[in-house]
Image (cartoon, helix red, strand yellow):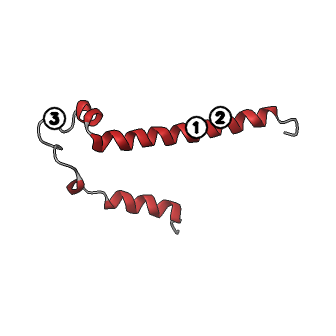
Amino acid sequence: MSLSRLTLVPLALALAASPALAHPGHGHGDGHSLLHYLSSPEHVWPAAAALLLAAVIGGAWLWRRSRRRKDPRS
């Protein structure tokens, strides 16, 4: 049984993640609260980028889906 590249890449990335890469503030006082994640730029920018990417992908999917429904050939 062999693993495909689509399986190995996320597995390697998950194994490479390390808590040592955390920025200051994690684990000290308020480091794991919702306020920390919503107010720290180290978390806000990646979250905003992920939401934007999800919106673009979701919008493209919805647009293609609506185009397929209007297409008389399908």
Numbered disc 2: secondary structure: helix
Question: What residue is shown with label 2?
Answer: 62
* Mark nearer the N terminus (3 vs 2): 3
* Mark nearer the N terminus (1 vs 3): 3
Q: Residue furthest right?
A: 73
Give the percent coordinates (x, y) of residue 6.
52, 60
The image quarter in which residue 20 lies? bottom left
Q: Type of residue at label 2?
A: Leu
Query: Which numbered marker is on residue 58?
Result: 1
The image quarter in which residue 26 lies? top left
Q: Is residue 7 left or right of residue 30?
A: right
Q: Is residue 11 left or right of residue 71?
A: left
Q: Are marks 2 and 1 in contact (CB under 8 Å)?
A: yes
Q: Is residue 19 above or below residue 44?
A: below
Give the percent coordinates (x, y) of residue 46.
37, 44
Q: Residue furthest bottom?
A: 2
Residue at 11% x, 36% y: name it: 29
Give the percent coordinates (x, y) of residue 2.
52, 69
The image quarter in which residue 62 lies? top right
Q: Type of residue at label 1?
A: Gly
Q: CA distance from mark 3 to mark 2?
A: 39 Å
Q: Type of residue at label 3?
A: Asp
Q: Is residue 39 left or right of residue 10?
A: left
Q: Is residue 7 above or below residue 43?
A: below
Residue at 15% x, 43% y: name it: 27
Packing grade of label 3 (10 A; few <14, some 14-19, many >=20) is: few
Tell me the quarter of the image containing the C terminus.
top right
